[in-house]
Amino acid sequence: MNMINIEKPSQQKLSELGVDSWFVWEKDVSQFDWIYDEKEVCYILAGRAVVIPENGESVEFSAGDLVTFQKGLKCVWDIKEPIRKHYQFG
C-alpha cells in the first residue's frame, strides 16, 4: 500500500467529501519532521510542498491536489511555497 496518494479531484468529489467544512492549516516555507498517528486527507488550496517518507521516494504536491497520508507514515515535510490546505483526520 502506498503511504501517500495524490489525485486531482473533481468538484463533485470535493463536494461529496465535504472539503469546504474541513479545518484549514497554513504554514510558511519551512522543513519539519512529522509522524501520522492516524490517516489524514487534505486538499491543497495554495502552495507547494515535497514530503520525503522515511522509507520511500519523495512526493511533490501543490494547489488542486487531494492528498491522503496513511497512518504510520514517518516523513519530512519540505514546504517550497507557503501552503494552505483543508484537512481531515481519521
Image (cartoon, rainbow, N blue to C red):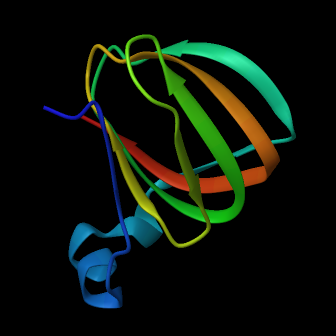
* Up/down of 89 relative to 17, above or below: above
Residue at horizontal 39 percent and vertical 18 percent from the top? 36
Instruction: Work out which quarter of the rendered image holds the C terminus and state it.
Output: top left
Rendered location of residue 39, percent (x, y):
27, 31
Q: Residue furthest front?
A: 57
Name the residue located 44 percent from the left edge and 57 percent from the top edge.
22
Q: How many marks?
A: 0
Image height of 42 relative to 90, above or below = below
- Name of the residue lying farthest toward the right: 29
In percent of width and height, residue 31 lies at: 77, 23
Q: Is residue 3 above or below residue 22?
A: above
Nearer the observer, 46 or 26: 46
Which residue occupies 59% across, 55% down? 85
Which residue, as the protein is rendered here, is positioned at the far left?
1
- Vertical order, 39 against 32 (above or below): below
Taking depth in this image into account, of 88 and 28 the one nearest to the observer is 28
Measured as percent of width and height from the top left, residue 16 is found at 21, 77
Tell whether 72 sits left or right of 56.
left
Q: Position of residue 66 (x, y in %)?
A: 40, 61
Tell me the quadrant of the picture where the N terminus can be found: top left
Give the left or right position of residue 61, taking residue 16 as reference.
right
Residue drawn at the location 35% of the way across and 18% of the way down? 73
- Residue 57 in which image quadrant: top left
